[in-house]
């Protein structure tokens, strides 16, 4: 199938998404049009679309089960307790660093980045009011920390990138640890650099949580620790505990430690609701990934990079960045890129772990564009105007781009050392 067909399919999907059409349906229609425009018959187009969904179905199952841990962290108040503890420990003088770290840790342990920002937002508004910070300043702090945590988390984007490369989830998380830490430092620097101009935080219109009823910090953190330890058994001891098992076990261990058994049903319902939205989006993403995978678009991109000395190393992060721009979603971007380009990246001699890691970090570069839900959810968390929210895009892109570049550098260093 011709590359132009895949490009037309992507273009149609983007236009429909920009027109506020349902993202999953937009991607499915784009895949259908792309296949026909690429010169293949209707029956073959549908076959490629179905194959694309089949390829990512194992990851969808794992993502649905990951909702157990995510739901427990949010509905029991564990996520709020973790954020509050970090902020109280560092104090008001280091409040911006505390906000960055809070969003980082919450995202790193498995909370969706937009949910992590929404969770920390009430505390951030309270601090911002006292310190006379602008909404732009506190929101960038939370987004920067969240992006850094997202490349080392058992979140859907990492799960599906690892799955499509047949790589260990814990290994994909581990190799991005240094880029995540360096990205944290950059985020703190950018937050301090950004002007305090713009709308100051003067009210706390978002309802504050009753922090007195939150679980203890140690019981709150136990669930994620159990999940991460179980995932780490594979690289450390050779014992394979699939994320499908490790993440729900971590969630159940956490709810038992917090003695919040009565909230189990609510937590499961919340986690399933959040993950179901992602699963439906991934079905749409899988259809167009099937079209791209069977087109010559991969060869076109590869030939365009052959003249660069680091061309092969750039396939993964560039594809992640481009697909995140198309979908304005880290998860959908990582899905499209890994499902479409994994075979090309592996054929170029890049290991499965590093291929997944570079796509994952690349997917954070442009996942915040206005045609996606993250842009609007984060703006709403601090009641920011659209005009001010747009001003943060350059800073967010700088953070995501730095994460992608740092992952490539770490890959090249590891390759030379080996």
Image: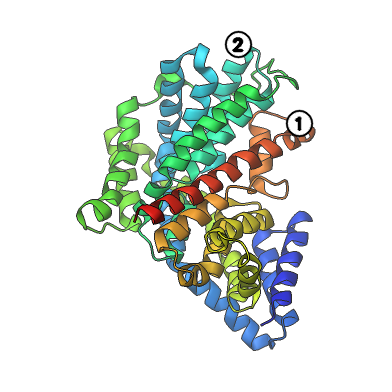
* Image location of residue 271, percent across then percent down: 46, 47
Q: What kind of element bears circle 1? A: helix
Residue, disc 2: 130
Let me know if residue 228 appears in the view: yes
Say left or right for 234 vs 343.
left
Instruction: Give the number of callouts.
Output: 2
Badge number at residue 388: 1
* Image location of residue 183, percent across then percent down: 51, 37
Between residue 249 and residue 141, name the one nearer to us.
141
Give above or below for 257 relative to 193.
below
* Image location of residue 176, percent across then percent down: 43, 46
Say left or right for 205 vs 18.
left
Between residue 56 and residue 187, name the one nearer to us.
187
| First in sequence: mark 2 vs mark 1 | 2
Between residue 247 and residue 304, name the one nearer to us.
304
Q: Quadrant of residue 163?
A: bottom left
Report the quarter where the C terminus lies. Answer: bottom left
Q: What kind of element bears circle 2? A: helix
The alpha-carbon separation of the residues under discs 2 and 1 comes to 21 Å
Let me know if residue 111 appears in the view: no
Q: Quadrant of residue 82?
A: top left
The residue at 35%/32% (across/down) is 220
Badge number at residue 34: none
Report the quarter where the N terminus lies. Answer: bottom right
The residue at 52%/34% (across/down) is 145
Give above or below for 157 relative to 312.
above
2 and 1 marks in contact (CB < 8 Å):
no
* Image location of residue 240, percent across then percent down: 25, 59
The residue at 61%/28% (across/down) is 190
The residue at 70%/39% (across/down) is 393
- Disc 2 crowd rating (10 Å Cα; few below 14, some 14-19, many 20+) is few
């Amino acid at each position: 199938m011709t590359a132009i067909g895949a490009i037309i399919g992507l273009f149609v999907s983007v236009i429909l998404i920009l027109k506020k059409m349902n993202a999953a349906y937009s991607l499915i229609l784009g895949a259908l049009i792309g296949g026909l425009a690429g010169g293949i018959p209707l029956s073959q187009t549908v076959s490629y679309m179905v194959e694309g969904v089949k390829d990512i179905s194992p990851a969808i199952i794992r993502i649905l089960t990951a909702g157990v841990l995510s739901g427990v962290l949010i509905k029991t108040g564990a996520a709020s307790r973790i954020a509050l503890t970090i902020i109280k420990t560092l104090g008001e003088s280091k409040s911006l660093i505390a906000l960055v770290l809070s969003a980082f840790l919450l995202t790193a342990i498995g909370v969706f980045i937009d949910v992590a920002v929404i969770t920390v937002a009430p505390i951030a508004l309270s601090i911002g009011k006292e310190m006379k910070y602008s909404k732009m300043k506190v929101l960038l702090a939370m987004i920067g920390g969240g992006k850094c945590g997202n490349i080392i988390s058992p979140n859907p984007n990492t799960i599906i990138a690892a799955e499509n490369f047949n790589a260990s989830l814990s290994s994909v998380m581990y190799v991005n640890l240094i880029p995540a830490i360096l990205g944290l430092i950059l985020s703190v620097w950018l937050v301090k650099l950004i002007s305090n101009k713009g709308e100051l935080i003067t009210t706390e219109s978002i309802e504050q949580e009753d922090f007195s009823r939150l679980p203890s910090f140690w019981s709150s953190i136990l669930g994620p620790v159990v999940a991460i330890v179980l995932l780490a058994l594979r690289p450390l001891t050779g014992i394979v505990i699939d994320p499908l098992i490790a993440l729900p076990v971590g969630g159940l261990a956490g709810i038992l430690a917090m003695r919040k058994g009565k909230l189990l049903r609510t937590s499961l319902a919340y986690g399933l609701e959040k993950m179901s939205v992602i699963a439906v989006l991934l079905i749409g993403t899988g259809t167009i990934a099937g079209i791209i995978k069977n087109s010559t678009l991969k060869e076109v991109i590869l030939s365009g990079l052959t003249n660069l000395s680091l061309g092969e190393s750039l396939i993964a992060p560039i594809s992640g960045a481009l697909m995140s721009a198309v979908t304005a979603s880290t998860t959908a971007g990582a899905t499209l890129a890994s499902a479409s380009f994994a075979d090309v990246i592996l054929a170029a001699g890049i290991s499965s772990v590093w291929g997944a890691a570079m796509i994952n970090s690349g997917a954070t570069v442009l996942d915040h564009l206005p045609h996606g839900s993250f842009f609007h959810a984060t703006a709403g968390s601090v009641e920011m105007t659209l005009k001010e929210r747009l001003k943060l895009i350059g800073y967010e892109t700088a953070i995501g781009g730095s994460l992608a570049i740092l992952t490539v550098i770490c890959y090249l260093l590891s390759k030379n050392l080996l």
